[in-house]
Image (cartoon, grey):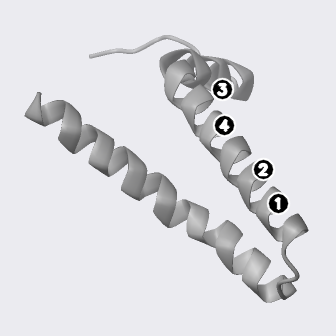
Amino acid sequence: MDDTRPPMSVVDTLRNHVRDHKRGMFVDLVFAIAWVTAVSVIFDLLSAPQWAYYLTLAAGVVAYYGFFWSLELAMEQQ
């Protein structure tokens, strides 16, 4: 099989990736903004150490996967 198409540029590759994953990327962005906003508001109200703030921000990764895993399970059970 002879593929004579020219290689894709980096811009074309990024454009294709965004087009294919647009909804998922938007959901990821909304979750990240909501998590950082909630953590920032809570820690602005509390007098907690800086390391706890960063640990809570990092826990957002676990929260993200836990939330979407449980959402997927709930949708499968319907």
Question: Looking at the image, which residue is at 73% across and 53% down?
Answer: 38
Marks 2 and 4: CB-CB under 8 Å? no
In the rendered structure, which disc, 3 or 2, sits on the residue that comes first in sequence? 3
Secondary structure under tag 2 reads helix
Using the image, determine if residue 59 lies above or below residue 75: below
Q: In which quadrant of the rendered image does the N terminus lie?
A: top left
Secondary structure under tag 3 reads helix
Task: Name the amino acid type tagged 1.
Answer: Ser
Residues at marks 1 and 3, CA–CA distance in whole angstroms: 31 Å
Marks 2 and 1: CB-CB under 8 Å? yes
Marks 4 and 1: CB-CB under 8 Å? no
Marks 3 and 2: CB-CB under 8 Å? no
Return the residue at label 1.
40
Return the residue at label 2.
37
Q: Nearer the viewer, mark 2 or mark 4?
A: 2
Return the residue at label 3.
14
Residue 40, percent from left and from top: 82, 60
Residues at marks 3 and 2, CA–CA distance in whole angstroms: 28 Å
Residue 3, percent from left and from top: 40, 15
Residues at marks 4 and 3, CA–CA distance in whole angstroms: 17 Å
Using the image, determine if residue 67 lies above or below residue 61: above
